[in-house]
Amino acid sequence: MVTCPQIPLTVFDLEFTAWEGSMARRWLGPGEFTEVVQIGAVKLDAVTYEEAASFEVLVKPRLNPAISGYLTRLTGITNAEVAARGVDFADAYRRFVEFASPGPIAAFGRDDLIFLANLRLYGLKDAPPLPAYINVIPWLIAQGFDLKGKHACDVAAVAGAEFSGRAHNALDDARSVAAGIRSVAARGAPPLVRL
């Protein structure tokens, strides 16, 4: 009998350009694009869901290069930090895919669509494909959690796990989701990933 090795799961979160009211407008205001500003991720052991590695990168938006005051208040990310540590989206995306491969990847909601929107926005047709994607929301709802009005930063608390990071920091939010997954799995929930 041949057995397949279990593949680690990478949980990620994105922060992207936003302005006062842009979420309510669904980023349909003039010049509003969901340009990625930060990618945070944790690679989890395939069996225990314990963190095995982490990844974080700041990204320089191309179309709206100045971070809004609203986004800075929300995330703590400043224009000075992006200028000092930020890289182009193409480089950040490639690094993330390398970190997450061979996959799968998971997030709270459809952050995969934000990646795809940025690839289209910048015309990056030759970028490597994302690994297989899992939206953790349906799995959490199936376990009986009410997620209305919740964000990635809320997942740990909703699942009864500890969260000590900054809300709306991509790496800390990925850790919140990972802590929630770990907590729910430890209580006997069916596996998030069936390999």
Image (cartoon, helix red, strand yellow):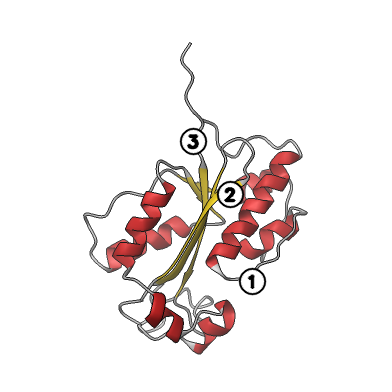
Crowding near pointer 1: few (<14 within 10 Å), some, many (20+)?
A: some
Question: Label 1, on which residue?
Answer: 166
| Above-or-below relation of 11 to 163 | above
Nearest-to-viewer mark from 2 and 1: 1
State the image coordinates of residue 48 (x, y, percent, origin top left).
64, 38
Q: Secondary structure at mark 3?
A: loop
Q: Secondary structure at mark 1?
A: loop
Question: Label 3, on which residue?
Answer: 7
Q: Is residue 117 left or right of residue 41?
A: left
Whether residue 147 is visible, yes or no, is no
- Which residue is rendered at x = 36% and y = 50% of the image? 98
Q: Nearer the viewer, residue 88 or 147?
A: 88
State the image coordinates of residue 40 (x, y, percent, origin top left).
50, 62
| Above-or-below relation of 185 to 14 | above
Q: Secondary structure at mark 2?
A: helix
User: Counting residues from the N terminus, which is met first, the one under dot 3 or under dot 1?
Assistant: 3
Type of amino acid under label 1: Arg
Question: Label 2, on which residue?
Answer: 136
Q: CA distance from mark 3 to mark 1?
A: 29 Å
- Which residue is rendered at x = 70% and y = 57% of the image? 156
Whether residue 181 is visible, yes or no, is yes
Type of amino acid under label 2: Val
User: Counting residues from the N terminus, which is met first, the one under dot 2 or under dot 3?
Assistant: 3
Residue 115, located in which quarter of the rendered image? bottom left
Residue 155, located in which quarter of the rendered image? bottom right
